[in-house]
Every structure is written in structure tokens, then in C-alpha cells.
């Protein structure tokens, strides 16, 4: 694993944030290590954005505590802001400045290296070298997202926060941005991101905290979360002729649950290979013809269903935590 578990860069204890009678974040405990990509996954309204806002110093917690690289998010907020970078859900930039000029401007605002060499290095990190002289309004949506990431890195942060970074992007742009995040991690920056995309979290993150109704309901590596399920794979098929007794299917090796309905079978199993081989043997003995036989691994969506008893539903678009006190603070021109 690429990160160092001896070096804690974020540690929270019982973080709570309320908006009136609504508890947006309800006692969140997190530990994030130097050099990892840490994901906070959950449906819209789960409390992901509010959690990030407290860690970034944009909102004070109602109770609990958090430290970033040893600095308290309330008492040492000026020090916290020096060591973090923030990529907002929506960032408004100057349309008529070029990508290079925008980076130079932000570096000047931070009072850090704004030389052409530094600008080129940041553009290279987000794969925008060829767009250095392109105006912002000439960049695609994915390119503007990558430029906003470059802006979050001008101060060479210890930790970079990214809130729903791929929302609204097409699949190609989304995968380009995933590589950008990996590049950031490889350069030594710890990345904390929120997402409501299960696939994104599973592919990109070293560890994931799953949030629901303001609470962390699970935290582990993607594979660790999936391995904790009673079944880690599915075997599915349509029945063309004949039928099975459900008890015979449930007796197959490694099968945890068998579902039969509408001429279709679905086996939840801890070992897809064993269950598939046994199913084919049973099919031959029973004279049952199968069509469209397929296997699939369990996913984080199955983890969410197992933990909450309901399917994961996430609308395309902005994470909607409960009504914030200052809704405009998550968008606009990034300032420090």
C-alpha cells in the first residue's frame, strides 16, 4: 500500500455539525494517513460536503475536534490554510486569461513560486501542457476541472481536498481526472475526495469512509469492505428449459443465498468458481438448460445495501447536504 500508516495527517474525533434541527454530520471519527487517496462516499445529503467544509476551516464544528498535520482546525486555522489545497465543487475562473496566466495569478496571491518553470510543472501534473496558452473559455469541462486542481496545488499543499471532482464529466474526462489525482498522490500530496460514484471510489481510493445520514457507517479499503460481505460474487443465469429446487441451489458449494424468479436464478457466493462449476454439474444432472450464464463480483453498492438495507441512489449533480448557512462558500473564485 502506497501510504505510510505511521504518519497521520488528518485525525477527527466526534465531529458534529447541525443546521437547526438537522444533524448534517453526526459524530464523525476519521484517520487519514500521509500519501493516501482517501474517499468519503455516500449519497446526496449524506454529510460529505459539510465534513470537508469543517476540515477546510470553512465551517466551525458544533462539537468535536480535528487536527490536520498537527494543527487544530479551529485554534490554528491560519496554519491549516497554509498546508491545504481546495478544489471546489464549482469554480468560476477568469474566462479571458490563459491557463498559464491563471496559475501565475494564483501563485502570486499565495506568495509562492510563480516562475514559468513552476507554472509548467503544475500544468504537466494535470496534463495541460498543450493548453498553456489557451483561454479558460476555450477549455472543455474536463480541462477546466483539471485546471482547478492545478490551482489547488500552487502552494504545494500537504493535503488536497476535492469535492465531487468528476461530477458532470463524460466518462473519458472522468478517467483523465482519475489519473490526475493519482499523479498528485505520487507527488506526495495526500488527497481527500468526496464522491457519490461507487465505481470511482472503488477504482481510485486507497481507503473509503462510507457516510449515510451524517454518520460513518463503514471504513476500510475497497476490497476490505467487499470481503466483509457474506457473499463476494454472484452467478446468474436464465433458465431455458426445466427447473431447479431452491434447496438444491442453496446446497451448492460456497452459496450463501439462492434466488429463483421469473425463469432466472441468482446465486450469491463466497467463491464464484466453485459455485459455477457445481451449478453446471447440477444443471447437467437435472436436465436444465441455462442461457446467458454470467458471473460478477460484489461491489460497494452491495456493501451499502448490506449496511443500510436499501439500494444506493445518487442523483447526478451537486451533493446536497442540509441547508447551509452560507451556500455560496463552496463555489466561486478560490481565495485565501
Image: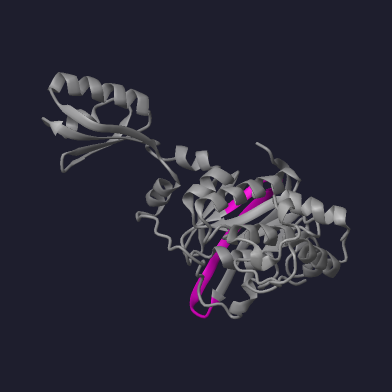
Residue 231 shown left or right of residue 162 in the figure: left
Q: Residue at x 45, y 62 (%)?
A: 316
Coloration mode? one colour
Q: Is residue 312 visible?
A: yes
In this view of the protein, which residue sits in the foreground, 144 or 183? 144
Residue 324: where, in percent of width, then height? 56, 77
Image quarter of residue 118? bottom right
Residue projecting furthest to the left:
242
Prevailing secondary structure of the magenta residues: strand
Question: Residue 211, percent across and down?
Answer: 50, 58
Q: Nearer the viewer, residue 290 or 174?
A: 174
Spot occupied by residue 302 in the image (x, y as percentages of width and height): 39, 46
At x 81%, y 68%, the residue is: 105
Residue 54 seen in the current view: no
The residue shown at (54%, 49%) is: 172
Residue 130 located left or right of residue 49: right
Q: Quadrant of the N terminus?
A: top right
Check the picture and name the quadrant holding the C terminus.
Answer: bottom right
Q: Quadrant of residue 286?
A: top left
276 w.r.t. 118: above or below: above
**94 over 147 or under it: above or below:** below
Of residue 117 and residue 39, the one placed in the foreground of this image is 117
Residue range corresponding to the magenta coloring: 19-39
Is residue 202 shown above or below 213?
above
Q: Position of residue 137 (x, y in %)?
A: 65, 68
Q: Exactly how many numbered labels are in the figure?
A: 0
Q: Is residue 23 magenta?
A: yes
Name the residue at 16% across, 39% down: 263
Magenta-span inclusion, residue 315: no
Viewer-closest of 283 and 169: 169
Amino acid at each position: 500500500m502506497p501510504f505510510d500508516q505511521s504518519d497521520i495527517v488528518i485525525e477527527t474525533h466526534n465531529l458534529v455539525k447541525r443546521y437547526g434541527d438537522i444533524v448534517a454530520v453526526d459524530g464523525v471519527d476519521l484517520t487519514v494517513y500521509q500519501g493516501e487517496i482517501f474517499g468519503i462516499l455516500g449519497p446526496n445529503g449524506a454529510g460529505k460536503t459539510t465534513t470537508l467544509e469543517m476540515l477546510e476551516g470553512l465551517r466551525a464544528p458544533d462539537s468535536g475536534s480535528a487536527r490536520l498535520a498537527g494543527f487544530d482546525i479551529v485554534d490554528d486555522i491560519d496554519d491549516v490554510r497554509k498546508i491545504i489545497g481546495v478544489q471546489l465543487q464549482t469554480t468560476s475562473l477568469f474566462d479571458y486569461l490563459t491557463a498559464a496566466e491563471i496559475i501565475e495569478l494564483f501563485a502570486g496571491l499565495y506568495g509562492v513560486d510563480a516562475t514559468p518553470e513552476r507554472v509548467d510543472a503544475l500544468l504537466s501534473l494535470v496534463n495541460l501542457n498543450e493548453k498553456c496558452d489557451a483561454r479558460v473559455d476555450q477549455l472543455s469541462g474536463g480541462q477546466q476541472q483539471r485546471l482547478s486542481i492545478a490551482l489547488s496545488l500552487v502552494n504545494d499543499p500537504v493535503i488536497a481536498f476535492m469535492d465531487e471532482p468528476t461530477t458532470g464529466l463524460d466518462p473519458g474526462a472522468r478517467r483523465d481526472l482519475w489519473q490526475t489525482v493519482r499523479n498528485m498522490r505520487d507527488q506526495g500530496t495526500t488527497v481527500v475526495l468526496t464522491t457519490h460514484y461507487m465505481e470511482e471510489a472503488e477504482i481510485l481510493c486507497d481507503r473509503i469512509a462510507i457516510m449515510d445520514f451524517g454518520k460513518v457507517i463503514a471504513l476500510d479499503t475497497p476490497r476490505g469492505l467487499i470481503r466483509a460481505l457474506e457473499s463476494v460474487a454472484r452467478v446468474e443465469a436464465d433458465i431455458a428449459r426445466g427447473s431447479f429446487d431452491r434447496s438444491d441451489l442453496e446446497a451448492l458449494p460456497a452459496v450463501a443465498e439462492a434466488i429463483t424468479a421469473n425463469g432466472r436464478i441468482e446465486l450469491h457466493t463466497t467463491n464464484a468458481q466453485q459455485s459455477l462449476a457445481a451449478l453446471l454439474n447440477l444443471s447437467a444432472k437435472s436436465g436444465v438448460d441455462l442461457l446467458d450464464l454470467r458471473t460478477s463480483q460484489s461491489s460497494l453498492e452491495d456493501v451499502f445495501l448490506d449496511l443500510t438495507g436499501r439500494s444506493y441512489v445518487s442523483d447526478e449533480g451537486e451533493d446536497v447536504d442540509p441547508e447551509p448557512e452560507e451556500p455560496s462558500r463552496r463555489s466561486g473564485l478560490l481565495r485565501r
